[in-house]
């Protein structure tokens, strides 16, 4: 629980993970992801932005180890252990029969640790998302945004080296979504964590990330990368600034270019 | 969404008052109406017998049935105990067998493919048609009765629990995989809790069925000897045209069924009320 004092500027960050020439083919002929190359550095906040079918979720499933690439390699710096990875899905994905603290306990429970042993870690993670008073509540007693916070706390509790978020706020209303975006950035400042965030919202990706990887569909692939060089911490003021509007335009152009661009096998 | 905090909201306008009154009325009616209807039915039954001067060997009045119940309590209560023992033992074995088999089914697709048809055949064949064979092959009468009741009761538990074990949230399954859960951990922490509401639904059905199975098996078994249950007492009383005793025994069987169903419902509520949708009361 002692993160480095600050995230170094881009270009000076240590490497965390390398995806090189990764292909994923389903059923022998559906190319979900083609020749993806991505280097993730410690402290990066990367958004994967693209239309549906561009392989964003496939990329996450490959990184999380739920699927193996058809060809190519994914290599973690220093190898990957369970607990190195935290995952947040589009739905809160909580166990309804378990209380908030029991849900957050899950990663430790599966390693054979008792609830009492990791009480401090659990309370720390709940405090991080502002839910320390709800440890004994059941998920059904919480609002959609609060459930998502529990889900985030669960992903943080092992202090993972990388957090994968698959459109976590897509199902929430705009007000809650903005609040959670702000809180997520605050968390990142505190924990100096590395995040890969899948979204199809240009605005969300610009607000959150320092790198936007724009992806194209059919076959799913990386089209371009947009660097968001606005400084952190980013607040509500940033959301209404001219810089933000300009960056959104840049990302939006890149996304449109990706959608119009013809892939190697686009018409096949 | 929280429902707990909303109960304390102040009742302010006319509409809400009306709503609150309607709620209260409904709560009372839920208990009062069935009681009134049953009492009315018993009263009508009594009047029908008295007004038409129906002899008790054709249709006894409710008073006579109750009197017989008290009079024959010694014999009937021991018969009730026998039926109850077989019913509960069959239910217990059905729970163990049904859940155990369901767990095996979800652990191995091939096992399920091999044995599921077997379970279906056992289920769709009427127990009355298998029972005579069972009584030929199984010497121990109690064991034979138990087997009959079990055949009837275990299938809803098996099929419901299997469905439940296979209904886990796919994202949670992924999460378990990412965190390196073992098969056993996944079963214990994820699949069994997911299956619990399904299992309890099956239990409610199986409770009634095990009673039916026990009663039907007794009919088929016929002659009593040691340990005669309620069904045998009904048969015996029928031969002797002791209609009031038939009614008294019938009353006990019906009451047993109600008690089993209520117990299963209470158990279900106790286990689920904290988290499952089926047990959560909603406003409006």
Image: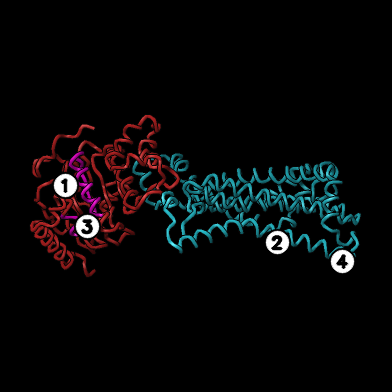
Span of residues in magenta = A177-206
The question of residue B241 being in magenta is answered with: no
What residue appears at the point 21 percent right and 36 percent down from the top-left corner?
A78
Mark 3 and mark 4: span between their CA atoms? 89 Å
The answer to whether dots 2 and 1 both sit on one chain is no
Quick check: marks 4 and 1 in contact, CB under 8 Å? Answer: no
Numbered label attached to residue A34: 3
Judge by depth and name the residue closer to the eye, A191 or B69.
Answer: B69
> The C terminus of chain A appears in which quarter of the rendering?
bottom left
Mark 2 and mark 3: span between their CA atoms? 71 Å
Q: Nearer the viewer, mark 4 or mark 1?
A: 4
What residue appears at the point 59 percent right and 47 percent down from the top-left corner?
B266
Judge by depth and name the residue closer to the eye, A247 or A238.
Answer: A238
The question of residue A183 being in magenta is answered with: yes
Judge by depth and name the residue closer to the eye, B107 or B263.
Answer: B263
Q: Chain of mark 3?
A: A
User: In the structure shown, which secondary structural element does the residue marked by tag 4 occupy?
Assistant: helix
Residue located beneath label 2 in the image: B37
Residue at far bottom of view: A267
User: In the structure shown, which secondary structural element does the residue marked by tag 3 occupy?
Assistant: strand
Quick check: marks 2 and 3 in contact, CB under 8 Å? Answer: no
Residue located beneath label 4 in the image: B51
Task: Tell me which numbered mark, 4 or 2, is placed earlier along the sequence.
Answer: 2
Q: Colour of chain A?
A: red
Q: Colour of chain B?
A: cyan
Numbered label attached to residue A39: 1
Mark 1 and mark 3: span between their CA atoms? 16 Å
User: In the structure shown, which secondary structural element does the residue marked by tag 2 occupy?
Assistant: helix
Picture quadrant of residue B75: top right
């Amino acid at each position: 629980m002692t993160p480095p004092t600050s995230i170094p500027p881009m270009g000076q960050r240590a490497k965390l993970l390398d995806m090189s020439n990764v292909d994923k083919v389903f059923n022998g002929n559906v190319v979900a992801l083609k020749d993806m190359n991505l280097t993730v550095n410690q402290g990066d906040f990367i958004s994967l932005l693209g239309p549906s079918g561009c392989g964003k979720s496939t990329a996450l499933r490959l990184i999380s180890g739920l699927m193996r690439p058809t060809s190519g390699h994914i290599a973690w710096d220093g190898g990957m252990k369970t607990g190195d990875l935290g995952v947040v899905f589009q739905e809160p994905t909580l166990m309804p029969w378990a209380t908030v603290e029991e849900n957050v306990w899950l990663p430790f429970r599966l390693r054979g640790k008792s609830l009492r042993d990791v009480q401090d870690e659990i309370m720390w993670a709940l405090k991080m998302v502002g839910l320390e008073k709800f440890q004994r509540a059941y998920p059904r007693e919480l609002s959609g945004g609060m459930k998502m916070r529990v889900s985030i706390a669960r992903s943080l509790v092992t202090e993972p080296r990388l957090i994968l978020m698959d459109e976590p706020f897509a199902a929430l209303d705009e007000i809650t979504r903005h609040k959670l975006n702000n809180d997520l950035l605050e968390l990142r400042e505190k924990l100096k964590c590395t995040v890969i965030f899948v979204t199809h919202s240009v605005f969300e990706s610009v607000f959150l990330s320092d790198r936007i990887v724009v992806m194209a569909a059919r076959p799913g692939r990386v089209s371009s990368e947009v660097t968001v060089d606005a400084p952190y911490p980013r607040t509500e003021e940033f959301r209404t600034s001219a810089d933000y509007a300009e960056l959104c335009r840049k990302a939006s152009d890149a996304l449109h270019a990706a959608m119009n661009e013809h892939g190697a096998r686009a018409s096949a | 969404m929280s429902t707990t905090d909303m109960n304390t909201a102040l009742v302010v306008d006319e509409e809400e008052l009306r709503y609150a009154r309607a709620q209260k009325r409904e709560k009372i009616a839920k208990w009062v109406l069935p009681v009134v209807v049953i009492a009315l039915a018993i009263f009508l039954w009594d009047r029908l017998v008295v007004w038409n001067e129906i002899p008790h060997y054709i249709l006894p009045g409710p008073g006579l049935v109750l009197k017989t119940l008290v009079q024959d309590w010694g014999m009937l209560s021991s018969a009730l105990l026998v039926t109850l023992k077989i019913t509960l033992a069959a239910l217990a074995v059905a729970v163990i067998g049904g859940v155990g088999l369901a767990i095996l089914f979800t652990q191995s697709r091939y096992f399920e493919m091999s044995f599921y048809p077997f379970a279906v055949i056992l289920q769709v064949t009427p127990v009355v048609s298998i029972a005579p064979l069972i009584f030929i092959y199984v010497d121990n009468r109690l064991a034979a009765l138990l087997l009959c009741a079990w055949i009837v009761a275990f299938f809803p538990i098996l099929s419901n629990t299997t469905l439940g074990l296979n209904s886990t949230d796919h994202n949670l399954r992924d999460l378990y995989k990412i965190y390196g859960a073992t098969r056993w951990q996944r079963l214990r922490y994820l699949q069994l809790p997911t299956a619990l509401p399904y299992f309890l639904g099956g239990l409610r059905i199986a409770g009634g069925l095990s009673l039916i199975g026990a009663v039907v098996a007794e009919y088929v078994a016929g002659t009593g000897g040691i340990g005669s249950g309620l069904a045998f007492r009904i048969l015996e009383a029928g031969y002797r045209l002791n209609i009031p005793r038939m009614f008294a025994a019938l009353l006990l069987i019906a009451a047993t069924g109600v008690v089993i169903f209520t117990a299963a419902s209470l158990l279900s509520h106790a286990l689920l009320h904290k988290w499952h949708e089926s047990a959560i009361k909603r406003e409006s």
